[in-house]
Image (spheres, rainbow, N blue to C red):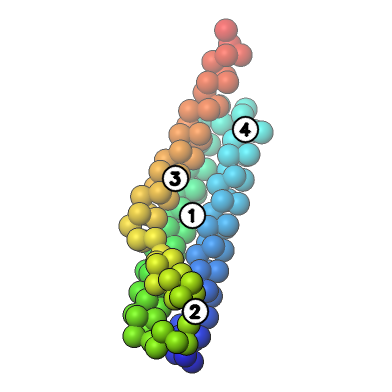
């Protein structure tokens, strides 16, 4: 039972790391979007759009890499929990708890996470390059 407690503790701490990385990404992404929306005149120049896009891409790449690595560890820890519970005496765990540990401790495949991250990144880049242009065109009409 001690091994199960240790791996569950590790799983939860790894899940906290993944959540922190997502929170940081959301904060920066919303900051970029807010900056684009509030400084439209700054983004009238293509050069400024390119600079902010390059900075965001570097950030997004490093965040995605850290998330991928952390998610791989989380996935492995989830599989370890499943293996430990499969081979434990069922008298130790209630059936409900055993069911949850066997069926609900799977982490998302790291590649699915990367695809989702990429879709969000593309959305942010579209906002950087498309949104200010649309507002400038409306003002000129």
How far is mark 4 from mark 1, CA to CA?
A: 20 Å
Mark in the foreground, 3 or 1: 3
How far is mark 2 from mark 3, CA to CA?
A: 43 Å
Q: Secondary structure at mark 3?
A: helix
Q: Position of residue 130 (x, y in %)?
A: 48, 28
Q: Is residue 65 left or right of residue 35?
A: left
**Residue at 55% across, 27% down:** 132
How busy is the neighbourhood of tag 4: few (under 14 within 10 Å), some, or many (20 plus)?
some
Mark 2 — residue? 94
Q: Secondary structure at mark 1?
A: helix
Mark 3 — residue? 121
**Residue at 39% across, 60% down:** 108
Q: Earlier in the sequence, mark 2 or mark 4?
A: 4
How far is mark 3 from mark 1, CA to CA?
A: 10 Å
Q: Earlier in the sequence, mark 1 or mark 2?
A: 1
Verify CB contact (< 8 Å) between mark 2 and mark 4: no
How busy is the neighbourhood of tag 3: few (under 14 within 10 Å), some, or many (20 plus)?
many
Q: Position of residue 2 (x, y in %)?
A: 48, 92
Q: Position of residue 63 (x, y in %)?
A: 47, 59
Q: Quadrant of the C terminus?
A: top right
Verify CB contact (< 8 Å) between mark 3 and mark 1: no
Mark in the foreground, 2 or 3: 2
Mark 1 — residue? 59
Q: Residue furthest bottom?
A: 2
Which disc is residue 37 wearing?
4
């Amino acid at each position: 039972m001690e091994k199960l407690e240790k791996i569950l503790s590790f799983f939860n701490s790894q899940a906290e790391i993944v959540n922190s990385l997502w929170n940081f990404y959301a904060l920066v992404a919303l900051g970029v979007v807010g900056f684009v929306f509030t400084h439209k005149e700054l983004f009238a120049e293509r050069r400024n759009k390119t600079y902010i896009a390059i900075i965001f891409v570097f950030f997004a790449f490093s965040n995605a890499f850290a998330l991928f690595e952390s998610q791989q560890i989380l996935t492995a820890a989830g599989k370890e929990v499943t293996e430990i519970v499969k081979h434990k005496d069922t008298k130790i765990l209630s059936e409900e708890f055993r069911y949850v540990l066997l069926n609900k401790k799977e982490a998302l495949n790291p590649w699915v996470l990367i695809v989702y991250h990429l879709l969000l990144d593309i959305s942010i880049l579209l906002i950087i390059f498309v949104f200010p242009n649309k507002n400038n065109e409306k003002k000129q009409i």
